Amino acid sequence: MAKSMTNIKRMEVPKEVQVDRDMEEIKEAVSENKHAILEGIKLLKALDDADTLQALYALTNHRKDAMRLMAKELNKDQYSGVLENLTGFMFLLGELDVDAIRNLSDRVNRGLEETEKEPESKTGFMDLAKALKDPEINRSVTMLMQFLKGMGRD
């Protein structure tokens, strides 16, 4: 019977070969992520130009002191109302129908663009009555009336 092996000698890779492999792997990663790396460099440059990079570095190094000071500051009476209302505000944001608000905002923006135009003449009572026959104006007036009705409901 053969004797079992008790001493296994691992094949060692020379350090120079491992460094070459690592450098090749880094080159591939840089090549694949070139756009992200360049954008990251732009971001770092902008932070450095605004002297924000040094502040973030200092904040990171002294984060325990910064958190302690911020908690101490937020415990002041002048901020109590803001902190009490913050949770209610967050729940309110969760209840909002973002798509409906976006749709309304788009319509308001289109209406504001129309107000930029110079009116052709003064508007009289008969002009208002005629304007209600225009489907776009009628839809807007109806929408405003629905809004006012909903706002006045108990």
Image: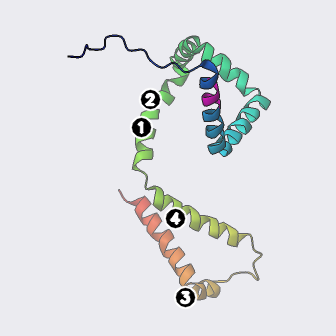
Q: Earlier in the sequence, mark 2 or mark 4?
A: 2
Foreground: 154 or 70? 70
For badge 2, the amino acid type reads Glu
Residues shaded magenta = 19-23
Q: Earlier in the sequence, mark 2 or mark 3?
A: 2
Q: Earlier in the sequence, mark 3 or mark 4?
A: 4
Q: Which residue is mark 3?
A: 133
Residue 67 falls left or right of residue 41: left
* Residue 23 image offset from top left, x and y in percent: 65, 30
* Residue 59 image offset from top left, x and y in percent: 63, 18
Q: Which residue is mark 2?
A: 84
Q: Secondary structure at mark 3?
A: loop
- Closer to the eye: label 2 or 4: 4
Q: Earlier in the sequence, mark 4 or mark 1?
A: 1
Q: Quadrant of the image for the C terminus? A: bottom left
Residues under labels 2 and 3: Cα distance? 50 Å
Q: Which residue is mark 4?
A: 103
* Residue 16 image offset from top left, x and y in percent: 64, 21
For badge 4, the amino acid type reads Asn
Q: Which residue is mark 1?
A: 88
Look at the magenta stretch and give its main secondary structure: helix
Q: Secondary structure at mark 4?
A: helix
- Closer to the eye: label 3 or 1: 1
For badge 3, the amino acid type reads Lys
- Closer to the eye: label 3 or 4: 4
- What residue do we see at 26% from left, 14% from top? 4
The answer to whether mark 1 and mark 2 are in CB contact below 8 A is yes
